[in-house]
Structures are given as C-alpha cells and as structure tokens.
Image (cartoon, rainbow, N blue to C red):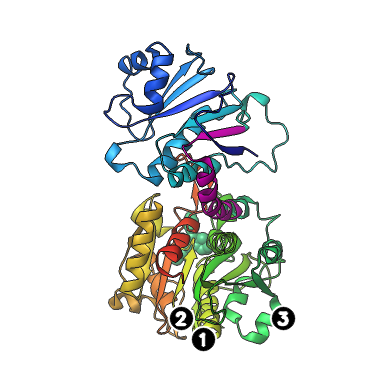
Amino acid sequence: MISIEFVSPADPRPQDGALAVLVHEGEALTGAASAADQASQGALGRAVGASRFKGAKGQTLDLIAPAGGLGVRLTAVGTGKAGEFDAAACESAAASAFQLLRASGVATLTLALEGASAEHAAHAAGGIKLAAYRFDRYRTTEKAEVKTSITTVRIETADPAAAKAAFANVDAVTNGVIFTRDLVSEPANILYPAEFARRVKALESMGLEVEVFGEDQLREMGLHCLLSVGDGSARETQMAVIQWKGAADPNAQPIAFVGKGVCFDTGGISIKPADGMEDMKWDMGGAGAVAGLMHALAGRKARVNAVGILGLVENMPDGAATRPGDVVNTLSGQTVEVINTDAEGRLVLADCLTYCRQRFAPKFMVDLATLTGAIIISLGMDYAGLFSNDDALSETLLDASKASGENLWRLPLPAAYEKQIDSAIADMKNVGGRPAGSITAALFLQRFVDKTPWAHLDIAAVAWRKPSSNPTIPEGASGFGVRLLNTLVAQSYED
Ligand code: BES
Ligand code: MN
Ligand code: ZN
C-alpha cells in the first residue's frame, strides 16, 4: 500500500526522495519547474535543451542526483498544452511520474502542484493510486529490485486541507475501480460464482443491500436461460441483486446496471481453441464493473437509487451441459434455440435484463458485457461498443465517456439484421452468423428489454489491457466502466 499525503509547498522535502514537476507543452519552465531549474543551477533547463522533451502529454525527463537540495531525482513531466490542462491531464501526468519512478529505488515521491486547484490535486492522487495498482496476491518469489520502491507520495498543494476533502469523493470511485480490478484479476478456480457472490455480499458493510439467489431459487423464478449456461459446470450458478438507496426518497424509481459474470468461458460444448483460453477468466468483467460501480456509489454516498444485477455462471462442457440445437425457455416467455453454446453471454443477460425490468421498472438499464470477439475487430482495443434503443440515454453516456476518458463508440441496431437471428423452431437463435456479430448480439439483447430505455456496452476489448499506453491502467484488469458510469450518475441522475 502506498500512502498519499497532501502537504504544503513550505513543508521540507525528504532529501532522499524524488521531485516531479509539471511542464506544459512548448512552454518555458514555470512554477516549481522554474524553481527547480534555479536550484539545480540551470541543470533542468540544460537537460530540456539537450533532449527532445517538449512537455507533450506523458513525456518525462529524469535527472539523477541534481544539485541544489532537490533530492536524489528530479523529473519533469509533460502535461500537453496548457490550455487543455484539466483534472484528467493532471491525473495522467501524476500517473506518468509514478510509473517512471515506481521501481527506481526511491521511497518518497513529491509531486509539486502548488499552482493547481484542490480538485486537480485530488485527481492527481487518484491517478497515482490507479497507476500503483498491482494484483500481487499470488507472487511469492519476486526479486526485491523489481518491486515497487515508492511507499509515500507527497502532493504539494496550496490548500492541503481542501485537496484532502476533494480526494474523499475521488478516492471512493478509485476504490470501486480497484474492487473491480481485484475481481477481474482473480483466476477462475478462486473466483467462481458463489465466491463472487460472497465478495459482493460483504459490501453490505458499506450500506448496500445484497440478495443472492442460487439454482433452486432461480429455477423457481423461471430464469431457465441463465441456468442453461451453467448446466455443464460443477459450480452453482448465482444471481446477485445489489441495491443502493441514496436518493432522498428511498422508494424513488431506480436506475439499473446489469453485468455479464461468466467466471470462466470454455465455450461449453462448442468449445474454444486452447490457445488463449486462459483469458476467459475475465469474462466476468461486466459483472465486475457493476459491482465496482455499486461500491463507488456507496463509498461516496451518491444521492441516487441504483440497482446492480449480476448474472454469475461458469460455461463448461460436461454430460449435463446444454447441447447445440437445444431449445431453452427464458424468463420473458420467449424461447431460444442455442446454436452455439459459446454465445452464452447473451443468454445470461436475457434473463437478467428481464428480471431487472419486471422487478424494478427502472428509469433505464445499462448492461456491461465482454460479449463478442467481433467488437475487438470493429473498434480495436481503445473503445467499448455502445448500442441503445434510446438517443437521450446514448447522449448522456457519450457525455460521460468524454468526461471520464473511458471511450465509447455508438453502433446501430438495424431492424434489417433481425432476420439473422430467426430460428426455424424457436422464437430466436443465439447466433447470427459472421456479419456484424456484435450488432446481432445486441439485437438479441434488445428483444428482452421491452420499452425500457436501455444501453448495452460491449467491453470485450477494454476490460483487460495487455501492456498499456495509459499510465493509470497497469497491464491487466482495467476496471473499465466504473468511472464512466459513476460519471453518468454524477452528471445526470443525482438528486
Ligand atoms: N466471452 C466471449 C467473447 C470474447 C471473445 C470476449 C474474445 C473477449 C475476447 C463470448 O462469450 C463469445 O465466446 N462470443 C463468441 C460469439 C460467437 C460464438 C457468436 C465470439 O465472439 O466468438
Ligand atoms: Mn462464449
Ligand atoms: Zn463469454
């Protein structure tokens, strides 16, 4: 754990630590950077002149053992253009400085933000906490020299008390992201549906209400389509329902979030190739994001009523597994011919969406799912696909996307493609062939939302990062969706 402190620029800096200063793109050294330049007898300015450092976003320049009592290391961090410097740029610069120095050997990093607002300082702290994230639970023999050496981050700011107060909200959201990252990182032998449900149940200590339904109850309730996905698994299928009642009226109409929680996706009888199958431990990234969002809303006591529904199941092949060609009944009454047991996410969501609207009649439902490989082909690694039956909801989501930096791109739901999921013997089939695979998956989901305003986020590409260019997202689980949807709530749905 890294400790983050807000301190006054007048407080003495530890002499064995590192100092990071911000430099705007194409501009002369100002503020702490100019003071550091003078103290180092012009070393910083000379280093900038001798290098290609121009202050571009994410660029860093590192001086070791500078003169002038600046500690053992002085780092200039580019922020991008001064005119575009905002909380997100400040967060990103802080995260870049942290990543550069993470395992450098220094224990204390001081970030000079004396000119920035309390809000910016709070976001810098959040960025550092996200950058510092590592899932270390199962490492036992890591060499000391590759371990994170930074234990303390000091953020120098004009009003430390105000920054600390602003950090409370940012930190609640950051902790939600970290809760999601921990869930998504766990291997499937540890995090199976019942264990996922237990970890969510433990959130009751934060003031959330959590119900967990097992297979007997789900069968009685009629969620046969969800259950069909888990028929081949030794692990019991679960559905978790999480409620946060933060609005002035606890009975006011809620907003709702639904997550695909396939704790492992082998493909079932339509089994996947061995190569890369281990990645399918994170096929619960949608449910992980919904759980982290509820954690964030409770942590910052958001003035909203929100429901989170998680469909938790493991897709395995065995003698009891669903076969290609089987027909299953859904909670909605519609029947589905399961052509490919690997198109299981939509079967999970079909029943969870129906349950959600029947029980809660929410203002809207947003589902998150690592639903299709095709979305990776369509949009690459930096965008989640957005599908919606409601233009107003789409716009608020796209606004939240811009504000949070979690990218969405809207794709259409053409009625003409509906025939791709027609079945010869049931109301629909669960696959629509190769063309527009992400769209036909979304069209399938749309058949279960009725008139409820709904959006579907296909996060198959973004839930997990291979080595990443974003300093706040270390390699691994990204926590995508928590900040996006927290921003949606904060911007548009609080009392
Ligand atoms: N969980 C996968 C989607 C996925 C693929 C996520 C790759 C992340 C990376 C989903 O359950 C699946 O298997 N989808 C199939 C659908 C197909 C059978 C219509 C796919 O995308 O291949
Ligand atoms: Mn699958
Ligand atoms: Zn899947």
Q: Is residue 147 magenta?
A: no
Q: Establish whether ligand 3 lies closer than 8 Å to the Cβ of label 3.
A: no
Q: Which residue is mark 2?
A: 448
Q: CA distance from mark 2 to mark 1?
A: 7 Å
Q: Amino acid at mark 3?
A: Asp
Magenta-tinted stretch: 152-180
Q: Which residue is mark 3?
A: 216
Q: Residue at x 46, y 81 (%)?
A: 448
Q: Is residue 71 above or below residue 247?
A: above
Q: Is residue 7 above or below residue 251?
A: above
Q: Amino acid at mark 1?
A: Ser
Q: How many marks?
A: 3
Label 2 secondary element: loop
- Give the dominant element type of the magenta stretch: helix, strand or loop: helix
Q: Which residue is mark 1?
A: 332
Callout 2 touching callout 1 (CB < 8 Å):
yes
Q: Is residue 80 left or right of residue 323?
A: left
| Front in this rendered view, residue 123 or 363 | 123
Q: CA distance from mark 3 to mark 1?
A: 19 Å
Q: Residue 436 location, x and y as percent?
A: 34, 65
Label 3 secondary element: helix
Q: Quadrant of residue 322?
A: bottom right
